[in-house]
Image (spheres, grey):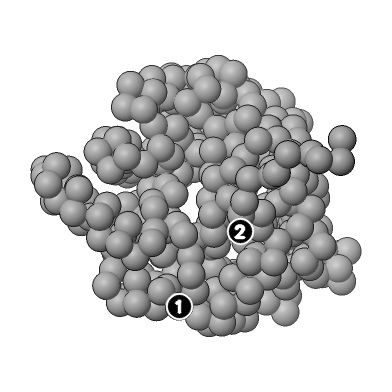
Amino acid sequence: MKLGCLTAMFSDKSLKQTLEILRPFGLQAVELGVGNYPGSPHVPVKELLKSPRKCKEFVKMLKDEGLEISALSCHGNCLHPDPAFAKANAKVQTDAIVLASKLGVKVVNDFAGCPGADEKSTKPNWVTCAWPEDYAEIVQWQWDKKVIPYWRKQAKFAKNHGVKIGFEMHPGFVVYNCDTLLRIRKECGASLGANFDPSHLFWQGMDPIACVRGLANAIYHVHAKDSKVDPSNAAVNGTLDYKHYGDELKRSWIFRTVGYGHGLDWWCDFISTLRLVGYDGAISIEHEDSLMSSMEGLSKAVALLKQALIFQKPTAMTWA
């Protein structure tokens, strides 16, 4: 495995400045934003798409730093009911797939998106219950008319470019748990899989380690991000929480840096289970801890994960 990070935490820095910041941490990989919600602060997408020479120079520059690109990330909503918004997000995603192919990157990370309730909608509609019947009808319409047609086309496009798409299972979008991830994969093809982020699973009441076993070879990339459920707030309000992320005292849960929601033992089990199911790619730190600076959050995550990660291939079983 390789330890890396999503560089969006340093979106106010240039790529050169970001690499200087990362150098002392001894990382082996970077995940780079190329538009939509993560922005594209470190990748000149248009320039690279036009120039094979600049693509080679970009990859070499990172290689000289001891880094590979674990994924390009363009998290957005290509299914948004606003046609202009959806079209712009889809263009960014399509460009990301083409650029990944040119750079030799195997994974593009995204959200699966969320449509509205019908053709007249102007805002996404994320359904969380089956009754009254209106909600079940909305979900069926979304999948039949929007989700499956779009992602079948994009899965084929990605496959033709030698690229896989990793969905972050994120509430608010149609893929948010194992069931919905496996459904979209079954309907649209094996080019679609998971960008596995345990933080969103914790607060939904899921067991990320069980989810790793359940998804197995459908995991294409992994985020290292933690979250912490506040037992007193969740006890009276549950964990579906729309309060602002900055309202930490009142929220039912918040994002934490690695180790501040779950300790070293949990992360060791998580990493070992990834190895058990055959995942040997990057573990990419994503910092969204509102109680810490990016530098402190990254530092603490790196320190813990260097203990938990399994960097080397296993040796032969001399004992068996």
Q: Residue furthest front?
A: 318
Q: Residue 24 bears which disc, if any? A: 1
Q: What percent of the width, then of the height, locates residue 320?
A: 87, 35
Q: Is disc 2 surrounded by few (<14), some (14 to 19) or many (20+) residues within 10 Å?
A: many
Residue at 68% from the left image edge and 39% from the top image edge: 177
Q: Is residue 18 above or below residue 150?
A: below
Residue flagged by tag 1: what amino acid is it? Pro
Q: Which residue is more in the foreground, 143 or 305? A: 305
Q: Which residue is more in the foreground, 151 or 20? A: 20
Tell me if 229 is positioned left or right of 26 in this view: right
Q: Which residue is more in the foreground, 278 or 44? A: 278
Instruction: Report the mark closest to the observer, 1 or 2.
Output: 1
Residue at 44% from the left image edge and 69% from the top image edge: 9
Residue at 41% from the left image edge and 74% from the top image edge: 23
Residue flagged by tag 2: what amino acid is it? Ala
Q: What percent of the width, then of the height, locates residue 130?
A: 74, 30
Q: What percent of the width, then of the height, locates residue 188?
A: 50, 19
Secondary structure beneath label 1: helix
Would you name the residue on which mark 2 appears? Answer: 224
**Looking at the rendering, which quadrant does residue 232 occupy?**
bottom right
Residue at 57% from the left image edge and 77% from the top image edge: 299
Tell me if 98 is positioned left or right of 53 in this view: right
